[in-house]
Image (cartoon, grey):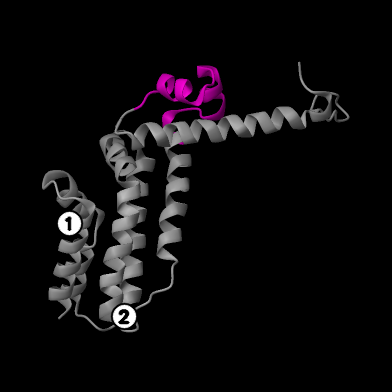
């Protein structure tokens, strides 16, 4: 039975602030459950797994998210905010070369956080226009940040090489295929960036 303190009856006689709060809480729990499952290494969680982890009914998952793509969209927004928080930190280095190396470090922190989600979304990109667009948007955002850091200091070939070197794909290759630790990956990318920019 609903707590009377939570209820607010509108003129139509049926609206409930308590019900709305529970709905918002369920939605947040569903998103958190999806993030937890993906971060634990499950590339393709289904709605049943999400419902079980969030401790809600399957119908509740689909009431808030009409399909899994909309759930990925919600997750993506949460992860984008996390990446943006890392990107917004002021640089300590006073010259552009130092900032490029610092940028490599920042991206490592962000990529390590979003890595499980990015690998999961890559597995479904062929089925989802949103996931493909999301990956492209992230790459474009990372490119814009790099261009601001280097300004007019490098030619187009060095810019393209830096864009590749500091990409998620480079980080993931070193971490997953080559088996480096986050610290080793960081050291390799920072050393490569220093050599590239002189």
Q: Residue furthest right?
A: 11
Q: Considering the numbered disc 2 on the image, is that residue within a helix, a strand or a loop?
A: loop
Identify the image quadrant of the C terminus. bottom left
Q: Main secondary structure of the magenta part?
A: helix
Residue 66 at x, y = what percent? 50, 27
Q: Which residue is mark 2?
A: 151
Q: Is residue 185 magenta?
A: no
* Residue shown at 30% from the left, 30% from the top: 42
Asked where in the image residue 163 lies, by quadrant, the reply is bottom left
The foreground one among 11 and 108 is: 108
Residue 11 lies left or right of residue 147; in this view the side is right
Residue 187 at x, y = what percent? 18, 63
Of tags 1 and 2, which is closer to the observer?
1
Distance between the alpha carbons at the discs numbered 1 and 2: 28 Å
Would you place residue 150 above or below residue 142 in this image? below
* Residue shown at 31% from the left, 60% from the top: 107
Range shown magenta: 45-70
Number of numbered labels in the structure image: 2
Q: Considering the numbered disc 1 on the image, is that residue within a helix, a strand or a loop?
A: helix
Would you place residue 142 above or below residue 31 in this image? below
Residue neighbourhood size for the residue with mark 2, other residues' Cα within 10 Å, grouped as few (<14), some (14–19), many (≥20): few
Q: Which residue is mark 1?
A: 184
Residue 50 at x, y = what percent? 44, 25
* Residue shown at 25% from the left, 79% from the top: 97
């Amino acid at each position: 039975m609903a707590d009377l303190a939570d209820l607010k009856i509108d003129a139509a006689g049926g609206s409930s602030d308590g019900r709305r709060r529970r709905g918002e809480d369920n939605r947040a729990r569903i998103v958190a459950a999806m993030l937890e499952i993906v971060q634990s290494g499950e590339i393709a969680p289904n709605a049943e797994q999400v419902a079980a982890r969030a401790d809600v009914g399957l119908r509740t998952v689909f009431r808030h998210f009409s399909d899994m793509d909309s759930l990925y969209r919600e997750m993506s927004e949460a992860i984008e905010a996390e990446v943006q928080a890392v990107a917004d930190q002021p640089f300590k280095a006073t010259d552009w070369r130092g900032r490029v190396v610092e940028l490599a470090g920042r991206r490592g922190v962000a990529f390590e956080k979003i890595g499980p989600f990015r690998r999961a979304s890559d597995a479904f990109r062929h089925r989802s226009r949103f996931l493909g667009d999301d990956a492209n948007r992230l790459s474009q955002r990372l490119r814009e940040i790099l261009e601001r850091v280097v300004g007019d200091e490098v030619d187009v070939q060095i810019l393209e090489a830096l864009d590749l070197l500091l990409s998620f794909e480079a980080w993931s290759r070193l971490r997953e295929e080559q088996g480096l630790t986050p610290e080793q990956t960081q050291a390799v990318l920072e050393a490569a960036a220093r050599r590239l920019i002189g």
